[in-house]
Image (spheres, helix red, strand yellow):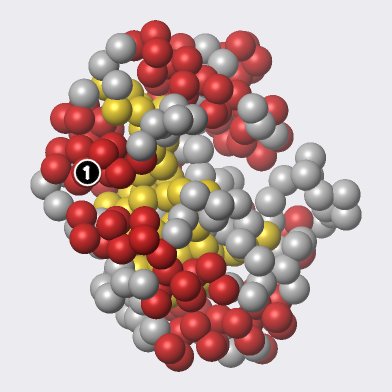
Amino acid sequence: MAVAPGRYGIWAGGAQLTPELAAAIEQLGYGAIWIGGSPPADLELPESLLAATERVVVATGIVNMWGSRAPEVAVSYRRVAERYPDRFLLGVGIGHPEAVGEYRKPYATIIDYLDELDAGGVPVEGRVLAALGPKVLAVSRDRTAGAHPYLTTPRHTREAREILGEGPLLAPEQKVVLDTDVERARALGRAKVRDPYLKLANYRNNLVRTGFSEEDLDTASDAVVDALAIHGDPATVAAGLTAHLDAGADHVCAQILVGDDADYVPALTTLAKALQL
């Protein structure tokens, strides 16, 4: 695979990411920046982050198939990949039925979308697929460079690697809270995972498959929050991220959760030191 994101990256919403923040993330040693929040088909945001940096990989996590037509995405991809070879990874995904009125035949839509990306000149090695369940993980193995699962645990990572086999990229997202106050950290993590994620069928089904009960999800139990938003001192958080690598991931992207008024860069710096970047 030409695009090499390294072992650790940062996942952040598109509204949060600026060229200045991208440069800081690169300087701290992270290998990739994942843009959340369904970036639009013009791919102008990833291009601006690439322009502000020199080495870091920029990936979309993810372009929503319902909101961005594949032919338009393909044109944008070719523009960005030509300007920044081996530094851009196109992440695409199907989204959630609760958020998309026309959501129907999701598997067929994924296949059709990938067919259109093929026709538009987006190479297999330049794209990854948001994948949770076995069927879509198999598609990510066969039709893309790999899988970008969101809101998962090391157990899911281990099971995903079994489906993917050796070779395809496996790059899960993991929320983290750098705070040793358990109740405060859980409160922040719970607010971020409960609404909307624990109410979305795709995530609920996957979490039940990987061992949580419906009651865990309905109540946003401590067990769920502790697994989906790892918290503690820097060494504990770093170990939680590394657990995905030990379970078979090639790369793990940390979504660092901070309070609404908190400065984000110190947390980035603290985590980078704990990961020995």
Q: Which residue is mark 1?
A: 269
Q: Which is more toward the observer, 257 or 158?
A: 257
Label 1: state its secondary structure. Answer: helix
Q: Residues within 10 Å of mark 1 (few under 14, many from 20)?
A: some
* Residue 227, placed above or below residue 3: above
Instruction: Work out which residue is located at the far top of the displayed protein and give it.
Output: 183
Tell me which corner region of the image, top left, top right, bottom left or bottom right, holds residue 119.
Answer: bottom right
Residue 72: give x, y in percent of width and height: 70, 81
Quarter of the image that includes the N terminus: bottom left
Can residue 244 be seen here? no
Q: Residue at x 75, y 62 (%)?
A: 67
Q: Residue at x 47, y 15 (%)?
A: 187
Is 220 left, or right, of 165 in this rendering?
Answer: right
Is 112 left, or right, of 272 in this rendering?
Answer: right
* Residue 96, placed above or below residue 44: above
Q: Residue at x 15, y 52 (%)?
A: 277
